[in-house]
């Protein structure tokens, strides 16, 4: 059993991640847990800090239930180090998984995320993973996380335009989709001139390997 834990309280986002994981890893047992005590969305360091205590409760529960791997379903890799210290099974952050996949695909990648407040967190994470030399730029699309759930058509259009700008301007081989709420875009982006990398796809493949 692989457990995807969504540190925010938006259940529809959890469901979308599980659906994506099952499509990417048919035959694998995947369940999704939503942190009902977490914030509705994680946008920046303050939300991330608030999400960590209830997230760790779920990590401990998953480990005790015999999970073979835990996936933290937030692109900020919220609480990842603390979760790894707590669990006996592998714990994978969708952000870290996506960055490593992008680095294997080509020399340089950019990230398209939601709001400006998320940019410093992602830049710091990429640096801590030793991948700063592979980064073109972390771009904020100006789309709030929850708009990807409740105003999907307009939000998707805005994110797609930022992706196109990244490929035009950043001298990159791929774009990493910098939010779990963008999981639907991998198979639904038209006229994108390069590779899109989603963290849920990357994380479930690593979880299978482990």
Image (cartoon, rainbow, N blue to C red):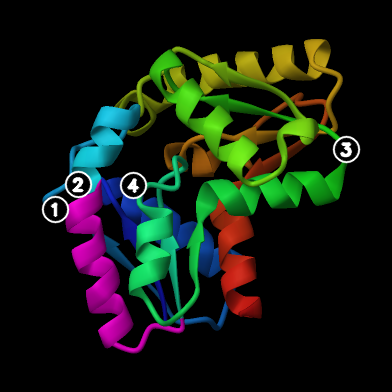
Foreground: 60 or 31?
60
The residue wearing badge 3 is 107
The residue wearing badge 2 is 9
Mark with earlier residue (3, 1): 1
The residue wearing badge 4 is 13
Q: Are marks 4 and 1 in contact (CB under 8 Å)?
A: no
Compared to 169, does 81 lie above or below? below
* Label 2 CA crowd tier, 10 Å (few <14, some 14–19, many 20+): some
Residue 121 on image: x %, y % = 46, 30
Q: Where, by quadrant of the figure, is residue 116 drawn? A: top left
Foreground: 190 or 180?
180
Residue 69 on image: x %, y % = 46, 76
Residue under the image location 63 percent in, 57 percent down: 202
* Label 4 CA crowd tier, 10 Å (few <14, some 14–19, many 20+): many
* Label 1 CA crowd tier, 10 Å (few <14, some 14–19, many 20+): some
Cα distance between the residues tagged 3 and 2:
36 Å
Cα distance between the residues tagged 3 and 1:
39 Å
Quadrant (top left/top right/bottom left/bottom right) for the C terminus:
bottom right
* Callout in the foreground (3, 1): 3
Mark with earlier residue (4, 1): 4
Give left or right: position of 100 versus 156: right
Magenta segment, which residues?
52-68
Circle 3: element type: loop
Residue 21 on image: x %, y % = 51, 64
Q: Are marks 4 and 3 in contact (CB under 8 Å)?
A: no
The residue wearing badge 1 is 36
Q: Are marks 1 and 2 in contact (CB under 8 Å)?
A: yes
């Amino acid at each position: 059993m692989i457990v995807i834990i969504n540190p925010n309280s938006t259940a529809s986002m959890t469901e979308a991640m599980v659906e994506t994981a099952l499509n990417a890893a048919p035959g694998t047992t995947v369940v999704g847990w939503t942190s009902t005590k977490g914030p509705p969305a994680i946008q920046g360091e303050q939300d991330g800090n608030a999400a960590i205590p209830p997230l760790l409760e779920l990590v401990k529960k998953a480990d005790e239930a015999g999970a073979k791997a835990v996936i933290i379903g937030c692109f900020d890799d919220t609480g990842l180090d603390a979760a790894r210290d707590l669990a006996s099974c592998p714990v994978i952050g969708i952000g870290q998984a996506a960055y490593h996949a992008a680095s294997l695909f080509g020399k340089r990648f950019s990230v398209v995320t939601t709001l400006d407040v998320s940019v410093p967190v992602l830049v710091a994470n990429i640096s801590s993973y030793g991948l700063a030399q592979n980064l073109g730029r972390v771009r904020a699309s100006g789309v709030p996380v929850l708009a990807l759930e409740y105003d999907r058509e307009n939000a998707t259009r805005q994110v797609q335009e930022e992706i196109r700008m990244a490929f035009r301007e950043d001298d990159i081989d791929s774009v990493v989709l910098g939010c779990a709420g963008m999981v639907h875009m991998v198979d639904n982006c038209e006229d994108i001139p390069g590779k899109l990398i989603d963290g849920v796809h990357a994380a479930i493949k690593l979880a299978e390997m482990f």
